[in-house]
Amino acid sequence: MRTSLVLLSARLLDPVTGELLPHTALAAADGRITSLGDDGEIRALADTSTTVLDLGGAVVTPGLVDGHIHPVSGADLTHGLDLTGCTDVEQARSALARAVRDLAPGAWLRGWGLDPNVFAGGPVETAPFDAVLDGVPALLLLFDAHSMLASRRALELAGVAGPRTFDQATAEVVCDAAGRPTGLLLEDAACALVERVAPQPTRAERRERLAAALRAMAAAGLTGGHVMDANGDSLAFYEELDEAGRLPLRLRVAPWCQPGTGMDGVRALIAQQGAGGRLWQTRGVKIFMDGTIDNGTAWLEHPDCHGESRHAFWPDPEEYTRVIGELHRAGVPSATHAIGDAAVRHVLDAVQKAKAEDSRPVRHRVEHIETVPDDTLRRFAELGVVASMQPTHCCDFTRADHTDNWSRRLGEERASRAWRCRDLHDSGAVVVLGSDWPIAPHPPLGVMAGARHRRPSRDLTRPPHGPEQALTALEALQGMTVNAAYAAGEEHEAGRIAVGHRADLTAFGDNPLTTAATELPDLPVLLTVVDGEPVHRDTRL
């Protein structure tokens, strides 16, 4: 077996103990770690065809894995005007005005990342932008990617002049008291009314945007991701990039199961499991139990302050329960988007029922878990359900004083139990960390930093939201290594630096466990290795 890669002068970090291993070098072949030892004995394994890198004391961890990303839709949605830096209506209006000046006549304006806190508690609608968007067809995606604002001209071109009904229980064309659309569209079904008349990029353009996004992820230290959709051309794009040697991450893809799928559709999803290529594979099924708190489409046990967030995403939640049972009996893990307390409780109830009827060990997961009461916490460990968390959502979209849109909607009691990473960990749950890109930035060091400091990444001088829910440096690293491997059922071959494990590795300029949380996002990523091959290499190496 030919040694393909040798790394020398490394500090190898064990994410289980937090200690450095008693080795300074490793060798890899056929995508696996084959030897650990000192520089001399490992160097002797190399031949003229081996890539040999002296890391100069860099700290190497198992490859970082994002527990929740949307690469294809993210590459699509983050094209256009970046509104993530806008903090009030005036800033957003000015950004839109500048973009309009550069538009060709009749062209559509696309924006993304708009935070509803821009509206300072007022209605989320296009009215503040009507003057600058007069006659301009525009689609402005809100940061949660579950809602968007469509300009008056865009609504006109789409023929949307009033309310509509949808199979998705939480989808809505929001209208005023006179029945006129305000511009706010909630959930995919409503957004699609206008999306389908907007110009679309070519397939080749979309594939290249995806390739660029994946390269950026690898450069940030990611070696893999748990992909929570397989919509449109996603699987074909992964296959094409993989076959061309252009897929720089290992991807585990969970296709969606939507209301109305039916048991034939569920069985088709089961049959699809395992399909894939060298670096990507279909594993698991993604399901939505609710929407988001910010746009009033979450499922809460008690309505929010606007009387919203009262309904499940599934018109009949018991149909969801039957789907979970069918997947469980087939040994297929589910990953359910559940943000509100009622949604999380229903998911846990469904898993409990499935396990009572069939005792096989299937690792189901809940995604997001933004607010839950005390009695829900222990059930994750009791049922073996993985808690998949995105701490940067708390950092960047809520505030410690609860004056943000998310907190105001929930009220003080529920806002005080935001993103309970610490409580879930201490109750025995396996906590996996991710970004939910494009909802939040994908660099994993920023995700781990947010889990530790819980402060707004744009202003680290501001107070943390729920500092008692912070994770330690080691726990944050585990959330993107050993815990991510466990959630995928891959702990026997991933998440550790050990002989026989995958040669998926990330090398840093210093130890991420001893780097201050506020400085962690700036820690240099020197090397990213996937399947034994460098996919990112700093010029210093």
Image: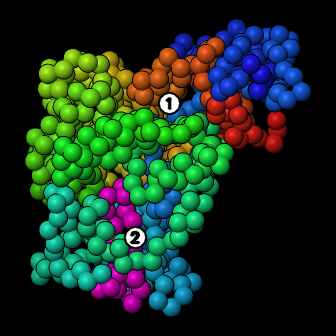
Q: Position of residue 375 (x, y in %)?
A: 17, 25
Residue sitting at x 53%, y 79%: 99
Residue sitting at x 20%, y 83%: 161
Q: Amino acid at mark 1?
A: Met
Q: Position of residue 65 (x, y in %)?
A: 52, 34
Sequence-wise, the earlier of marks 2 and 1 is 2
Say whether residue 299 is magenta: no
Q: Which residues lie in the magenta part?
A: 134-157
Residue sitting at x 32%, y 54%: 404
Q: Position of residue 488 (x, y in %)?
A: 42, 28
Crowdedness near tag 2: few (<14), some (14–19) or many (≥20) residues, C-alpha within 10 Å: many
User: Is 210 displayed left or right of 12 in the figure?
Assistant: left
Residue 57: tell me if it is visible: no
User: Is 171 displayed left or right of 447 in the figure?
Assistant: left
Quarter of the C terminus within the rendering: top right
Secondary element at image label 1: loop
Crowdedness near tag 1: few (<14), some (14–19) or many (≥20) residues, C-alpha within 10 Å: many
Q: What is the number of the mark on residue 480?
A: 1
How far, Cα to Cα, is label 2 from label 1?
A: 31 Å
Residue nearer the viewer, 79 or 446 = 79
> Circle 2 is placed at which residue position?
140
